[in-house]
Image: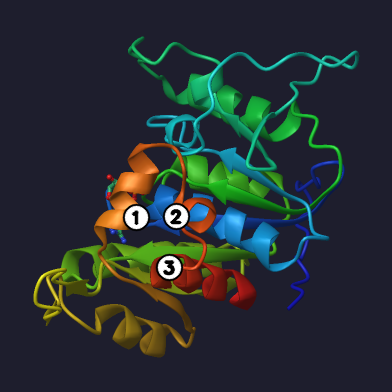
Amino acid sequence: RQHMARGLPRQRPIPGVKQVIVVASGKGGVGKSTTAVNLALGLAANDLEKSVGLLDADVYGPSIPKLMNLRGNPELTDKNLMRPLVNFGIPCMSMGFLVEDTAPVVWRGLMVMSAIEKLLRQVDWGTLDYLVVDMPPGTGDVQLSVTQNIPIAGAVVVSTPQDLALLDARRGAEMFRKVNVPVLGLIQNMSVFQCPKCQHQSHIFGADGARELAESLGVEVLADIPLHINIRETSDSGRPVVVSSPESPEARAYRRAAEEV
Ligand code: ADP
């Protein structure tokens, strides 16, 4: 499905990028970055003709370098733009490439805005069909600044089925609506845990929370991703599940979500 982004006056497209899809969440720790990475890889795997990039806009806690097993400093092009680092065929850009892992970055509001501006405007993406943006959690200045700066085809909101996460996810979805970014749907993460020994399924964070929220917002649940050790381990080792076990049910769930966006 194609989504036409309605451009606001201050919005300028990123040169070469056809569609921007942001992955957001109300809270941290719900699996937003893991989803962004596997969604980007899923988009690329579903259609080998499409080129997909990944932008880590979570300047406070960049996860893309670890998840995509990338480190180092981007080279500059002759136009003084940063060249993304590439793994698994996906060009990536992250604040994590520009500051030391261990250096505590004490951000002031203005610095955050200039960092975001740099990540949005000073990267040479070449040509991309999709740019997947891993947003910081919540609904603050960074989210607003991204939505005001570039036309966005749609937002995917990640939540666990837990009440508190859902409450924040609703705020996130409503923020996007307010700024005219279409909400493509919710991804319910960690909804079911299947015991590897006895196969019993437990709904640790509840079962259907995201489904009910999606209904009340009038959007779809794009995927239901189980709580699975394979997802955690492959993420930690920098070989995301969509590339390391493409035939697993977990990887298929991400690829199905990618088909929906
Ligand atoms: P966020 O970006 O929302 O802060 P992350 O994507 O960093 O969250 O995920 C938080 C932690 O949970 C990570 O250790 C990640 O590997 C793990 N995780 C995320 N989704 C799943 C899942 N479906 N099953 C198992 N572990 C998961």
- Percent coordinates x, y for residue 200 in the rendering: 11, 81
Say which mark, if any, is on residue 248: 3
Distance of label 1 from label 2 (alpha carbons):
6 Å
Quadrant placement of the C terminus? bottom right
Residue under label 1 = 231
Q: Give the x, y percent position of residue 68.
A: 51, 37
Nearest to the observer: residue 72 or residue 247: 247
Label 3–label 2 contact, CB within 8 A: yes
Q: CA distance from mark 1 to mark 3?
A: 10 Å
**Circle nearer the N terminus (1, 3):** 1
Q: Are marks 1 and 2 in contact (CB under 8 Å)?
A: yes
Front-lying residue, 11 or 88: 88
Quadrant placement of the N terminus: bottom right
For the residue with label 2, is its CB less than 8 Å from the closest atom of ligand 1? no
Towards the viewer: 227 or 79: 227
Residue at 41 percent across and 51 percent down: it is: 34
Above/below status of 74 relative to 38: above
Asked whether the viewer can see residue 261, the reply is no
Task: Give x and y (percent) for residue 71.
Answer: 53, 20
Name the amino acid type tagged 2: Val
* Label 1 vs 2, first from the N-terminus: 1
**In the depicted structure, whether residue 89 falls above or below residue 52:** above
The residue at the point 22 percent across, 75 percent down is 192
**Front-lying residue, 169 or 99:** 99
Q: Which mark is residue 200?
A: none
State the mark number for residue 241.
Answer: 2
Spatial separation of the CA atoms under disc 3 and disc 2: 8 Å
What is the quadrant of residue 8 in the picture?
bottom right
